[in-house]
Structures are given as C-alpha cells and as structure tokens.
C-alpha cells in the first residue's frame, strides 16, 4: 500500500522503478520514504520529507503521516508550512499588561493548563506591536494600557495577523465600540477568583488549539474577519466586488461575502481540491453528488453549469480527488483488517 500511496506504480499497476538504473530526485525520495515507513521503529526523524515531491505525492505522504502519527513519535524538520501543520499544535501566547503581578499570575495559570505553550510578556502596547518575531496565536491584552491603548494595539495586531485570537483584560467589564471592531473572543476580569480565571483559561486554550488545528478560510468584510471551516463551504460564486461564499452548516445554508477575487481563492484552496468549473464558480468536490457533461449537482440539490472551456480540467481534477479519497479509504481499511 505504501508504494501505491507514493505513486511508485503506473496506471497499469506495473512498477515504475522496474528496469531503471537512474532515478529522478523525486523518485529517489519516494523510495527512501517507503523504506523508512515499512520499518517498525517507534520514532521517525524526517528531514525535508516532501522537498522533491510532486503535489500529489506530497499530499499522499502528508495523509499517511497523519494516519500513523497516533502510533509513532514523528519528528519533522521542514521549511514547508503545509507539512508543519501536521505537527501537534504548540501555541504562542502573548500577555500585554502594565501590571506585572497580574502578568505573572496569568502566565502561571496558563502553564498549569498547558506547559508546552510559549508565553511572551509585554508591559506596553508599544513593545507588543514592535515585536516582529513572535507570530502569536493568542493574545491577552489589557484595554487600559498607558500610551498606546489596548483597543489601538488590538487593531494593529489584527492587521498583522488575521487569525489572532484576542482576549481583552479589564478591571471592569466595559466593552467599547472600538473593541467590537476587532471581535475579541472573551473578556477576562482581573478581579475574578483564581479558580474562575483558571476555568476561563481552560476554555480559551481549548478553543485556540481547535482553531489552530482546523483548515479555515478567512473572510474579511469592512475590516471584520471571520474564520470558516473549509469543510462547510459548498462553493464560491463571483459577484460584482469579490465573491459570495455558499456555506452548509448543520443542514442550514447561508451566504457570506468576501472581497477576494476568485483567482486568489482558487490558488489558496488548490490543495483542498476545489475545482473551477466555470469562470464564475469554484466548487468543493466533497459536495458534488452528480456530474453531467455540462453541469453538476451539489448536495443541496443546486445545479451549477460547467463551461466547455473548463470541462476537461474539471474532469481531471475531480477524478484525481476521487482517486485520492479512494486511496485514503483503502489504506485506513487495510489497517483495521
């Protein structure tokens, strides 16, 4: 199954490596990976495992690593952020508060919940926004900072990192119109009991790790950012300024808007097998239930046109997606037999 996963067989089922004395860099890397994966070692060390692979082979390697990582310790050295996403999530947390005692209290409480997280402390909004090295996942930010206020610092941080999860710290719960603009996830009251703060932290850290592990699409509309789980997106359609996003959540459909061009979205979601079936439509193949010559039917019974110019490319991409899904199912089934 491993050599099929890594594409060492051709369409007729014959070994590509038969009769060959010289191999490309990608072929040599595939062979090395197969030799590594068939070993029974409990610990695997992979140095740039996907650097010479084509897109499809890279996808297969990533899927295989995802499947086996529960049973092995896998250490990966890579410059590829996509394969880094396979790793267990270690979150970077910032605490920005001019009250040193509260910073210390909060940092200690966080370490009790998650000892592996990286914690960075800042005493002013200026030091926070000037730190270009730490790409934070979660930020605890005092609203009433001297100098640059918490509200102003939060706007700057959100512009730098759209995915940042923001928690406002306050002595009193007095949300301002400015604070709603950056959509904080929670308000944490300083005068709360330690047990209440600990409980809140547990919820906040769980939410942060869930968000970090999901494949999300970021929607921006008039400065407001929203995360969408990719698996809930039916398709994108072009409108006058940007695109509409057609979503299916818990059986209910809704439409959001983004100013991104469909070409940008197509490039962003290429690894997720989203198919451009028409100049106006980019669809999620997970929801295609029927394919005809000039149209497709979606899970919500909506029918979308397939343009003549894009038909062949769409058919190839959809076939590739189905093959990928079949291989994943076969591989998982073989592990349980």
Image (cartoon, grey):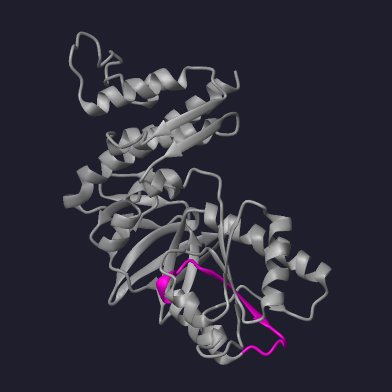
Task: Write the residue at 30% across / 57% down.
Answer: 266
Between 218 and 69, the residue placed more toward the observer is 69
Given residues 181 and 231, the one toward you in this image is: 181
Q: How many numbered marks, from 0 up? A: 0
Q: Quadrant of residue 47?
A: top left
- Above or below for 131 versus 36: below
Q: Is residue 280 visible?
A: no
Residue at left offset 43%, top offset 57%: 234
Residue 12: tell me if it is visible. yes
Which one is in front, 295 or 73?
73
Residue 142 lies, with reference to residue 206, above or below; the image says below
Query: Residue 331 appears at what percent x and percent y?
Result: 49, 25
Task: Tell me which residue sits at (27%, 21%) in the image.
Answer: 11
Q: Where residue 158 sits: x, y (%)?
A: 46, 75
Residue 157 vs residue 267: left or right?
right
Image spot of residue 50 (x, y percent): 34, 36
Q: Where in the figure is residue 262, as x and y percent of width and height?
A: 28, 64
Q: Is residue 148 magenta?
A: no
Outermost residue, top side: 19
On screen, residue 238 versus residue 163, left or right, reads: left
Q: Residue sitting at 52 percent across and 33 percent down?
A: 74
Answer above or below: position of 3 versus 139: above
Q: Which residues are magenta?
A: 159-175
Quadrant including the N terminus = top left
Query: Residue furthest toward the front?
Result: 100
Q: Quadrant of the C terminus?
A: top right
Q: Place residue 325 in its image quadrant.
A: top left
């Amino acid at each position: 199954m491993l050599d099929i996963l890594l594409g060492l067989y051709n369409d007729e089922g014959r070994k590509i490596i038969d009769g060959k004395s010289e191999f490309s860099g990608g072929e040599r890397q595939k062979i090395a990976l197969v030799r590594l994966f068939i070993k029974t070692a409990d610990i695997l060390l992979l140095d740039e495992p996907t650097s010479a692979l084509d897109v499809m082979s890279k996808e297969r390697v990533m899927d295989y690593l995802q499947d086996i990582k529960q049973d092995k310790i896998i250490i990966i050295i890579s410059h590829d952020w996509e394969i880094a996403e396979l790793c267990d999530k270690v979150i970077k947390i910032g605490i920005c508060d001019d009250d040193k005692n509260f910073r210390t209290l909060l940092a200690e409480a966080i370490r009790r919940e998650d000892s592996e997280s990286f914690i960075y402390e800042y005493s002013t909004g200026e030091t926070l926004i000037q730190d270009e090295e730490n790409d934070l996942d979660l930020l605890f930010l005092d609203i009433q900072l001297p100098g640059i206020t918490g509200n102003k610092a939060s706007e700057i941080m959100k512009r730098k990192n759209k995915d940042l999860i923001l928690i406002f710290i306050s002595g009193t719960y007095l949300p301002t119109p400015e604070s709603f603009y950056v959509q904080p996830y929670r308000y944490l009251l300083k005068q709360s009991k330690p047990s209440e703060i600990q409980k809140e932290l547990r919820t906040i850290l769980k939410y942060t790790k869930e968000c970090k592990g999901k494949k999300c699409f970021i929607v921006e509309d008039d400065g407001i950012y929203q995360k969408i789980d990719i698996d809930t997106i039916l398709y994108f359609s072009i409108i006058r300024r940007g695109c509409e996003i057609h979503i299916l959540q818990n059986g209910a459909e809704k439409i959001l808007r983004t100013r991104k061009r469909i070409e940008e979205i197509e490039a962003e979601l290429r690894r997720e097998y989203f198919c451009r079936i028409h100049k106006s439509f980019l669809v999620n193949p997970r929801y295609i239930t029927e394919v005809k010559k000039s149209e497709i039917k979606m899970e919500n019974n909506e029918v979308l046109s397939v343009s003549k110019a894009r038909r062949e490319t769409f058919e190839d991409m959809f076939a590739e997606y189905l093959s990928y899904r079949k291989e994943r199912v076969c591989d998982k089934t073989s592990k349980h037999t």
